């Protein structure tokens, strides 16, 4: 079995005269902690939208394992094991974290339409929801409507709902964006503790999060891959410093 779980081959996306992704060939390996970084306008979101099926590529292919998913609808990709935090149904403001996670778990198990009953009668679902609440530091707020949760906890709930689908590949689109500094450590710690069985692709501007999490980094500039490699190599790369990090010193703690 190949250890490559997701790959793109010569992916191009044009909008009129603008090339948003240019000949992007990317490999995501089993169990990877793979970060995509680059300045604004580098093509990161366009690339993720092609991986998830929101945007069809102009040319090139997307493969999940050995399966060509280039033309598959987003929901079918989720069913095959590709989940994205941004793409999981928007949080229901009136639902509690318990209800939201029961819906996600029930959906995966094929009983989402009667989640309110299965929670009471299906011990396995109840136990799984309880474990997710604990894993994502939501237990104390499990019975509060989502609208009352601090923003950082809502971001954690989005990640928890994606993990509830038991994806093979999880795409995290800026999980720390907009999260107050006081709540950011929770996101950092939780993302770091995601199960090793899940390959994670992270798009993030927070370099502390990127360098504490990633074991492989791909740098996009102007829609193309500038370079990629392990964090230490990227931190020391003069090209990366010039185009992306500028004068900012990157600290790397050895993970």
Image (cartoon, rainbow, N blue to C red):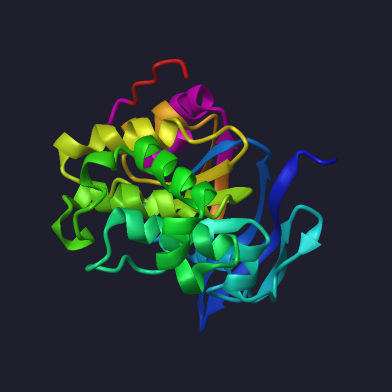
Q: Left of 151 or right of it: where is 80?
A: right
Residue 221 in view: no
Residue 224 in view: yes
Q: Quadrant of the N terminus?
A: top right
> What secondary structure is the magenta-colored segment mainly?
helix
Q: Is residue 52 magenta?
A: no
Taking the spot 48% from the left edge, 29% from the top edge, the residue there is 237
What residue span does the magenta drawing correspond to? 227-249
Q: Quadrant of residue 248?
A: top left
Outermost residue, right direction?
1
Taking the spot 79% from the left edge, 61% from the top edge, the residue there is 67
Taking the spot 37% from the left edge, 42% from the top edge, the residue there is 244
The percent position of residue 223, horizontal first and vertical second, equals 52, 60
The percent position of residue 168, horizontal first and vertical second, equals 63, 48
Placement of 218 over or under 83, stated as above or below: above
Taking the spot 72% from the left edge, 67% from the top edge, the residue there is 69
Placement of 53 over or under 40, stated as above or below: below
Q: Left of 139 or right of it: where is 55?
A: right
Placement of 136 over or under 63, stated as above or below: above
Nearest to the observer: residue 166 or residue 24: 166
The percent position of residue 29, horizontal first and vertical second, equals 68, 39
Nearest to the observer: residue 151 or residue 94: 94
Q: Left of 117 or right of it: where is 143?
A: left
């Amino acid at each position: 079995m190949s250890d490559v779980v997701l790959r793109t081959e010569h992916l191009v996306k044009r909008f009129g005269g603008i090339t948003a992704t240019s000949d992007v060939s990317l490999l995501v390996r089993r169990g990877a902690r793979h970060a995509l970084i680059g300045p604004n306008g580098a093509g990161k979101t366009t690339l993720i939208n092609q991986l998830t099926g929101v945007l069809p590529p102009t040319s090139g292919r997307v493969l999940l394992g050995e399966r060509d998913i280039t033309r598959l609808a987003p929901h079918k990709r989720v069913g095959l094991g590709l989940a994205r935090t941004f793409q999981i149904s928007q949080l229901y403001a009136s639902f509690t974290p318990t209800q939201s996670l029961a819906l996600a778990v029930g959906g995966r198990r094929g009983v989402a339409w009667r989640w309110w009953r299965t929670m009471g009668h299906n011990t396995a679902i109840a136990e799984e929801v309880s474990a997710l609440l604990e894993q994502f530091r939501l237990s104390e707020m499990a019975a509060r409507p989502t609208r009352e949760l601090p923003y950082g906890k809502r971001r954690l709930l989005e990640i928890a709902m994606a993990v509830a689908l038991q994806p093979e590949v999880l795409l995290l689109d800026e999980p720390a964006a907009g999260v107050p500094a006081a709540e950011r450590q929770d996101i950092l710690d939780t993302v770091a503790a995601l199960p090793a069985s899940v390959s994670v692709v992270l798009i993030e501007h927070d370099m502390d999060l990127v360098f504490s999490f990633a074991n492989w980094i791909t740098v996009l500039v102007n829609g193309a891959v500038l370079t990629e490699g392990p964090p230490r190599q990227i931190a020391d790369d003069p090209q990366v410093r010039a185009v992306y990090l500028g004068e900012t010193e990157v600290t790397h703690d050895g993970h």
